[in-house]
């Protein structure tokens, strides 16, 4: 769910993501016409991470694999261009809900897939069913201008079933759906379980986390949609 900017300059391969710039000259259909640049969110990640995993460690491999998968989901428009998943078998499960296929996940986007909820309307912080792929990404890019960084905190088991703990964070420095920015750190923690094939492509991904951790920070800002009484002090 990294909120990074895309620019039209061809660069060397990103050190945290595979299947990116080494394919920039190939027949890949990128969402915005070119491969993305992750400089801003990489800087945020390096400044704010709590762990620096040894090169070649299982933790580093899992961290980079998830970053690569998220990159493809956010920036490639055709499942046939994905290298990080097994498209025939892929399913995404979030907080025990019904799984989404690869095509379904690509259609709604990572934010809508992760933020869908069965709560009653009056308790929904974010209505994913009313958001498109584009509008959901625009909302979080606005809230986190420097990006929404992601790190692995721990890995509990290796392939073929990888279980891990993660942290997602950014600084609320832009407006979010009518809420003014606070400049504060917004973060949440979660658990992931990823089943991979012999080529280490994801076949099933399960994510468990508390959305209230995320929205608790994003809803602190003044809501411009609320009309205040002129006599209120």
Image (cartoon, rainbow, N blue to C red):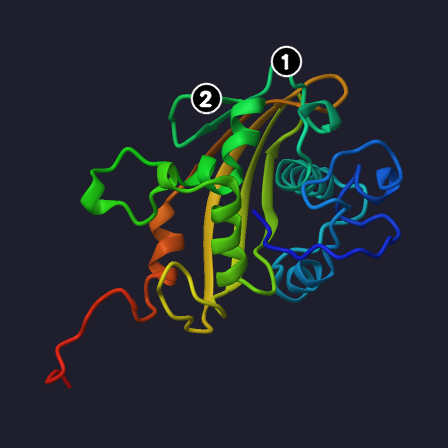
Closer to the N terminus: mark 2 or mark 1?
1
- Left or right: residue 36 versus residue 146 is right
- Left or right: residue 192 versus residue 212 is right
Q: Which residue shows up at 48% across the image and 42% down it?
A: 111
Q: Which residue shows up at 75% across the image and 54% down it?
A: 37
Residue closer to the observer: 24 or 192: 24
Rendered position, 191 above or below 205: below
Residue closer to the observer: 119 or 104: 104
- Residue 33 placed where, x, y %? 74, 44
How far apart are the alpha carbons under marks 2 and 1? 14 Å
Say the numbered circle drawn on residue 75.
none
Snapshot quadrant of residue 80: top right
Determine the residue located farthest toward the left in the rendered image.
231
Rendered position, 120 above or below 43: above
Residue closer to the observer: 224 or 124: 224
Provide the residue designation for mark 1: 88
Within 10 Å of disc 1 (Cα), the crowding (few <14, some 14-19, many 20+) is few
* Secondary-structure class at tag 1: loop
Say the numbered circle drawn on residue 99.
2
Q: Which residue shows up at 74% across the image and 27% down it?
A: 81
- Residue 120 placed where, x, y %? 20, 38
Rendered position, 172 above or below 67: below
Q: Which residue shows up at 64% across the image and 56% down it?
A: 4
- Left or right: residue 127 versus residue 138 is left
* Secondary-structure class at tag 2: loop
Snapshot quadrant of residue 119: top left
Residue closer to the observer: 49 or 78: 78
Determine the residue located farthest toward the top in the rendered image.
88
Snapshot quadrant of residue 129: top left
Quarter in which the C terminus is drawn: bottom left
- Residue 187 placed where, x, y %? 47, 57
């Amino acid at each position: 769910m990294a909120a990074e900017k895309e620019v039209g300059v061809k660069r060397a391969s990103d050190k945290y993501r595979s299947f990116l710039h080494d394919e920039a000259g190939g027949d890949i259909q990128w969402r915005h016409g070119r491969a993305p640049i992750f400089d801003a969110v990489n800087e945020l990640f390096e400044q704010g991470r709590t762990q620096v995993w040894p090169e070649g460690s299982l933790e580093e491999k899992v961290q980079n694999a998830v970053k690569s998968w998220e990159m493809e989901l956010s920036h490639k428009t055709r499942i046939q261009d994905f290298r990080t998943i097994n498209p025939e078998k892929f399913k995404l499960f979030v907080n025990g809900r019904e799984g989404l296929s690869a095509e379904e996940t690509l259609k709604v986007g990572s934010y809508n897939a992760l933020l869908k909820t069965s709560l009653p309307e009056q308790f929904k912080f974010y209505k994913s069913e009313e958001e498109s792929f584009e509008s959901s990404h625009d909302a979080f890019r606005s809230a986190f201008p420097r990006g929404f960084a992601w790190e692995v905190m721990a890995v509990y088991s290796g392939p073929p079933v990888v279980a891990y703990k993660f942290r997602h964070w950014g600084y609320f420095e832009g407006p979010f759906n009518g809420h003014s920015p606070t400049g504060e750190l917004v973060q949440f923690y979660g658990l992931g379980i990823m089943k991979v094939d012999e080529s280490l492509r994801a076949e099933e991904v399960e994510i468990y986390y508390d959305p209230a951790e995320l929205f608790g920070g994003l809803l602190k800002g003044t809501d411009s949609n609320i009309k205040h009484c002129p006599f209120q002090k």
